[in-house]
Every structure is written in structure tokens, then in C-alpha cells.
Image (tube, rainbow, N blue to C red):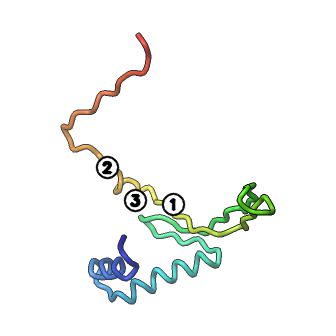
Amino acid sequence: MASKASNASDIAKAVGLETHEVINVFDTILAMTRRGERVTISGFGSFNRHIHKGRTQVTPLVAEGEVTYPDKYILKYKPSDTAKERFSVRKPPGAKASKKKSSRKK
């Protein structure tokens, strides 16, 4: 798993920016989503803050018998249609499709 600085360095080299500038972009996206704003990058996707509702879980491991987990915010990413198309794996032209076996009994 690559670090934030390593990823930022790779991106900076690819687009001709300084590493600290790319890190500032990451930090700005996080700050905006933390405030509840939706961040959309055309051709890439959107980031937004989503709330996971808290819950109470019954467990015999604690004396009270249940543990309460509070609400928490998470960061969600939704890829754009363009990003989905670029990321999807397609078979090269002329490759034969695999035959699926039928689950029906004859």
C-alpha cells in the first residue's frame, strides 16, 4: 500500500506539479467533504460525506450486555461514467467468450 506522499509524488510527476501542490489538493478535498460539501471532479467522480447510523449490539463479553456505537461520518466516492469505462476490463477483439455452464438439469 502506497503512502500519501508516494502517491502525490507519482501524480505530481505525471502532471508537472510539485508534490506539495498535489498534497494540498488532497487536503482541500478532505476539508471540503468534512464540511459536508460534495466535491466533483469531471471525468473522475465525486466525493461526499455520508453518515453511518449508530447501533447497539448485544454481547455477552461486557457486564452491561450491550455495546453502543455512535453515529460516524465516512467518505464516499462515486466514479463517473467516464471513469467506469476507462477502468472496466474488456476482452481484446477476437477473444472467444467463455461458455457458462447451465445450472438447469436436463
- Give how far across and how far down residue 87 sits, in percent: 35, 56
Q: For the residue marked with disc 2, what is the amino acid?
A: Val
At x 28% / y 84%, what residue is drawn? 16
Examine the rendered structure and indicate whether residue 38 appears above or below residue 22.
above
Q: How many C-alpha atoms fall within 10 Å of the one at disc 1: few (<14), some, or many (≥20)?
A: few
Q: Where is mark 3, residue-wise?
A: 83
Q: Earlier in the sequence, mark 1 or mark 3?
A: 1
Q: For the residue marked with disc 3, what is the amino acid?
A: Ala
Q: Earlier in the sequence, mark 2 or mark 1?
A: 1
Q: Where is mark 1, residue-wise?
A: 78
Q: How many C-alpha atoms fall within 10 Å of the one at disc 3: few (<14), some, or many (≥20)?
A: some
Q: What separation in Å lies between label 2 and label 1 (alpha carbons)?
A: 18 Å
Q: For the residue marked with disc 1, what is the amino acid?
A: Lys
Kindly state the secondary structure of the residue where label 1 is placed.
Answer: strand
Q: Earlier in the sequence, mark 3 or mark 2?
A: 3
Examine the rendered structure and indicate whether residue 95 appears above or below residue 60.
above
Query: Which picture quadrant has residue 5?
Result: bottom left
Kindly state the secondary structure of the residue where label 2 is placed.
Answer: loop
At x 22% / y 33%, what residue is drawn? 96
Disc number lying in front (3 or 2): 2
Q: Where is mark 2, residue-wise?
A: 89
- Asked if labels 1 and 2 touch by Cβ distance under 8 angstroms, the answer is no
Name the side, left or right, on which 68 lies relative to 94. Answer: right
Closer to us: 60 or 76? 60
Q: What separation in Å lies between label 3 and label 2 (alpha carbons)?
A: 12 Å
Q: Quadrant of the C terminus?
A: top left
- Give how far across and how far down residue 94 sits, in percent: 18, 37
- Give how far across and how far down residue 59 sits, in percent: 73, 56
Closer to us: 3 or 84? 3
